[in-house]
Amino acid sequence: MATLAVPPSVPSPAEDAEQLRKAFAGWGTNEDLIISILAHRNTAQRKLIRQTYAETYGEDLLKALDKELSSDFERSVLLWTLDPAERDAFLSNEATKKLTSSNWVLLEIACTRSSMELFMVRQAYHARYKKSLEEDIACHTTGDFRKLLVPLASTFRYEGPEVNMTLARSEAKILHEKIHEKAYNHDELIRIVTTRSKAQLNATLNHYNNEFGNAINKDLKADPNDEFLKLLRSAIKCLTCTEKYFEKVLRLAINKLGTDEWALTRVVTTRAEVDMQRIKEQYHKRNSVPLDRAIANDTSGDYKKMLLALVGHEAA
Amino acid sequence: MKTIVIARSKFRPPGTHQESKARGETMAQSDELEALTRAFSGHGVDERTLIAVLGKSHPEKRKSFRKGNPHFFKEDERSFERWDDHRIKLLKREFMRFKNAVVLWAMHPWERDARLMKEALIEGPDSYNVLIEVACTRSSEELLGARRAYHSLFEHSIEEDIASQVHGPDCKLLVALVSAYRYEGSNLKEDTAKSEAKILLNAIKSGEKKTQDEEVIRILTTRSKPHLKAVYKYYQEIGGSNLDEDLKSDSRLQETVQCLCTPEKYFSQVLDLALRPDADKSTKKAVTRVIVTRADVDVKEIDEEFSKMYGVHLSKKIEDTANGNYKEFLLTLIAKGD
């Protein structure tokens, strides 16, 4: 469930565009006004506002925001304003560049989006970067990482609930075997994780747990410093218990010395319209403190206000 | 030819009336028997001849046909000419060729490609070239559509089925090809194309198993088609030979390169093999598959390439080797572009 709060009666895109224009006018910027509009509009509404703004003022709203805003606040507003496919394409592209390279972001996007959503990301990637997502990932990764990430980003998983229990049993056995042999990058292991439907994978991993006594991720903890194993565990977590995965990312981002703003911004802007409510519940359960309070304690200024507007905030 | 058979029986050569009548009838008879045999051979069956000649025939004529065709009928120990069982099976296939072509043609291209891929997977390694063909000669959107149709038809993703049913080094290549969503614009970096041509040259010269080479797979399974065509060109300039020829020892990679860079040449070769008299049952299927799947795309270009490579137009070759409704149907599809 989303935490995005859209007012029951929404001004027209033209009115919103006008208000935003006013927010940029003159000395300084009216950040509160920007937040009060953009942070309370859904994807379709934001798209209309962008279109109207461009038609009325001859400028892309994002460019105007880029000029007027700065640092973490700007990043959160820009990411939020983009539509989901474009946003993911932007984040993926950023993740393939040397300075901002991150296998984690690629993995997160590939595994937590639905099959069709992932495909739309690939389409948006073509349009924006004139290349395919998979060619950029392939080009910028090597060895086992390429072996895992390219198929994860290219797969178009079946989305039905059908499960074959015989297959679940036999594939759980294969996974157990390969993990036991420490062949973590084995073709069969990669095959199962990167091609099976989420429903089938869930069934297989449940069976793994029942049959072999441990959850698969526990068995994959053999070497705590192995980067590949960490990625593999995250992939499995993303695919089978998404909210827990995001709770962990948020927890690590907030608890980190200073804060990992990029991770925080990414999770909040990409999940506010999807399942942030469930992530909040998970966070509260795990950390005994509500997410919005944790964010409020760890961030400040307009950046904080933007995040809280998206995440849903009880007090003023 | 069949019409001449009927006409000839009206024109008797000079000589005694009895002799010429007998001679005329034997000639007409042997022409008819020949026509009947032809009606049952090649691609598809000649329905009209079967109706006109076989349908109208008296029992003695049919007996002559049976006796005169040891390939179709064998003398049974209990004194009758018996249909060869295998031949009946073959005939069943030939009769079905028209039906298969029609059904395939009416199908939505996405369903068509999904079914073709499923069939290829079931048939095994000898048919895996069809997987490469579909994955590499369709546009990115068409391939996505085929993948969606596959979900609906078979409740699995194509990549999970390929990954679990294909064994050996080809598996990775096939999964990657079918998963690709290649950029389709003309934007390409010449420098990258040049350096990737060099990478391919080195990989091929090194003699290692090329399908295991990470970089070869990466380039062939992720780069856009315009980029790959540029790589093909640079490969030729730098190395002096053509990329697909150098991959002769690895037929999957060769097919991949041909489908991506020179599809008309690839399709012409497939059709040529399928139209040969010794073509086996799964090779013969290619005629229907290629013509139906390319009729809306590039069948004219394939026809031209075919004529360049084999000295005869595809339409002429089909005229000579196919029969009846099946032939008419194929020729109509080929002529559509006119």
Image (spheres, rainbow, N blue to C red):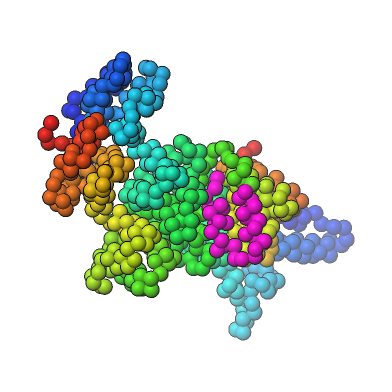
Left or right: residue A283 compared with residue A117: left
* Residue in view at x 68 percent, y 74 percent: B70
Residue A67 horizontal/vertical position (percent): 37, 24
Q: Is residue B188 above or below residue B236?
A: above
| Residue bounds of the magenta highlight | B195-224
Q: Quadrant of residue A44 in the image?
A: top left
Q: Position of residue A119 (x, y in %)?
A: 40, 45
Instruction: Write down the quadrant of residue B83 in the picture.
Output: bottom right
State the residue in front, A142 or A98. A98
Q: Please identify the quadrant where the N terminus of chain B is shown.
A: bottom right
Tally of numbered tags: 0
- Which residue is drawn at the image coordinates 12% and 36% (left, top)? A314
Q: Which residue is situated farthest in the right direction here?
A: B15
Q: Is residue B158 above or below residue A36?
A: below
On screen, residue A174 versus residue B301, left or right, reads: left
- In the image, residue B157 lies in the stretch drawn in magenta: no
